[in-house]
Image: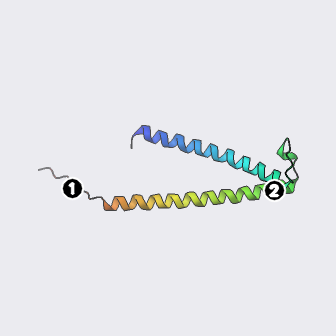
């Protein structure tokens, strides 16, 4: 793997994490607004505490679900990689 490819993976991971955080924040605010009776507050901290906490619980559940999906995909990718590695025939380098 070249340094350029490795850098691209690191950039992609950073962008993905930043996007995930923004999406979870937006989800939390929308769920809190929905739980507050679809009232849009100028500042979400002014919403009733019960709506804020309900939105937080829903956001945590969504985050846990996303982590489980990512874990399953990572384990699947690992199993595919290991299967491919096992199937490769390694020829010895014999210099005479």
Q: Which of marks 2 and 1 is in front?
A: 2
Give the residue at the far front of this rendering. 38
Label 2: how many Cα within 10 Å (few below 14, some 14–19, many 20+): some
Secondary structure, mark 2, is helix
Give the percent coordinates (x, y) of residue 15.
58, 41
Dot 2 and dot 1 residues touching (CB under 8 Å):
no
Give the percent coordinates (x, y) of residue 44.
83, 46
Rendered position, 21 above or below 35:
above
- The residue sitting at 78% across, 53% down in the picture is 31
Give the percent coordinates (x, y) of residue 83.
37, 62
Secondary structure, mark 1, is loop
Left or right, 7 with reference to 39:
left
Indicate which disc, 2 or 1, sits on the residue closer to the N terminus. 2
- The residue sitting at 88% across, 46% down in the picture is 46
Give the percent coordinates (x, y) of residue 57.
76, 59
In the foreground, 5 or 30: 30
Left or right, 93 with reference to 67:
left
Locate residue 82: give its quadrant: bottom left
Rendered position, 67 above or below 11:
below
- The residue where tag 1 is placed is 92
- The residue where tag 2 is placed is 53
Label 1: how many Cα within 10 Å (few below 14, some 14–19, many 20+): few
- The residue sitting at 84% across, 51% down in the picture is 38
In the foreground, 65 or 10: 65
Quadrant containing the N terminus is top left
Left or right, 60 with reference to 48:
left
Give the residue at the far left of this rendering. 96
Left or right, 7 with reference to 47:
left
């Amino acid at each position: 793997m070249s340094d350029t490819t490795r850098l691209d993976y690191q950039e992609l991971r950073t962008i993905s994490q930043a996007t995930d955080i923004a999406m979870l924040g937006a989800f939390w605010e929308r769920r809190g607004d929905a739980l507050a009776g679809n009232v849009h507050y100028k500042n979400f901290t002014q919403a009733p505490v019960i709506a804020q906490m309900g939105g937080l619980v829903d956001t945590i559940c969504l985050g846990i679900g996303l982590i489980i999906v990512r874990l399953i995909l990572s384990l699947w990718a690992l199993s595919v990689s290991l299967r491919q590695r096992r199937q490769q025939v390694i020829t010895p380098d014999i210099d005479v």
